[in-house]
Image (tube, helix red, strand yellow):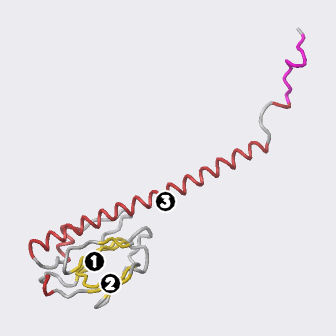
Amino acid sequence: MRTSASQRIDLDELGFTLVELSLVIVVIGLLLGFGITAWMSMKTSQQISATTTTLKTAASCLSKYVIHSEQTPAQTYFSKRCVDVDPWGQDIIYYNNGDNQEISSATTKTVRDGDGDHPDALWMIVSSGPNGTIETTSSATLWDCSLGDDLCQYTTKNALVYEINK
């Protein structure tokens, strides 16, 4: 049986050329690269959101103490009742102006963050942020949370106001 020229399969046309295969591999690599970058960004964003919730929960725990006792929460109270870890596995840090002082007589400090200075702070709670390192500093009159990627929340003396600083 004879086959016509139009029915013959040219063996040179089977398969892909090296250029075509290379192009497909490059496109797949680019898609994976963009996908991994977007996923990592989304993961960090979710961790920051979870940290915000963790800090709000810890602040709520401290606020309950203030409402019932009218005193600044002690470090031991925070350690036993309010302590938690952030999504990066680090403990939340609690700074206060003095354990068990009456709110009306408690001294206050200024909190410094990326937005500027916020005076009249009674306490500050801090998460280490994405780099996993606490970079805040404390002096007699100032808590500085503007140095790194830490997430900080503070409470003022006059009102139980919570602000997340990033």
Q: Position of residue 116 (x, y in %)?
A: 38, 82
Sequence-wise, the earlier of marks 2 and 1 is: 1
Mark 3 residue type: Ser
Q: Which residue is mark 1?
A: 124
For the N terminus, give its image quadrant: top right
Q: Which residue is mark 2?
A: 143
The kind of secondary structure element at disc 3 is: helix
Q: Residue at x 18, y 75 (%)?
A: 76
Residue 159 lies left or right of residue 32; in this view the side is left
For the C terminus, give its image quadrant: bottom left
Q: Residue at x 29, y 64 (%)?
A: 54
Q: Residue at x 24, y 73 (%)?
A: 161
Q: Residues within 10 Å of mark 1 (few under 14, many from 20)?
A: many
Q: Answer above or below: position of 96 versus 12.
A: below
Q: Position of residue 63 (x, y in %)?
A: 17, 71
Give the magenta part as a residue range.
Answer: 2-11
Q: Position of residue 115 (x, y in %)?
A: 39, 79
Instruction: Estimate the spatial distance between the alpha carbons at disc 2 and disc 3, rounded to whole Å.
Output: 29 Å
Circle 2/circle 1 CB separation < 8 Å: yes
The kind of secondary structure element at disc 1 is: strand
Instruction: Estimate the spatial distance between the alpha carbons at disc 2 and disc 1, rounded to whole Å.
Output: 8 Å
Residue nearer the viewer, 54 or 80: 54
Q: Residues within 10 Å of mark 2 (few under 14, many from 20)?
A: many
The magenta stretch spans residue 9: yes
Q: Residues within 10 Å of mark 3 (few under 14, many from 20)?
A: few
Instruction: Estimate the spatial distance between the alpha carbons at disc 3 and disc 1, rounded to whole Å.
Output: 27 Å
Mark 2 residue type: Trp
Q: Position of residue 42 (x, y in %)?
A: 46, 57
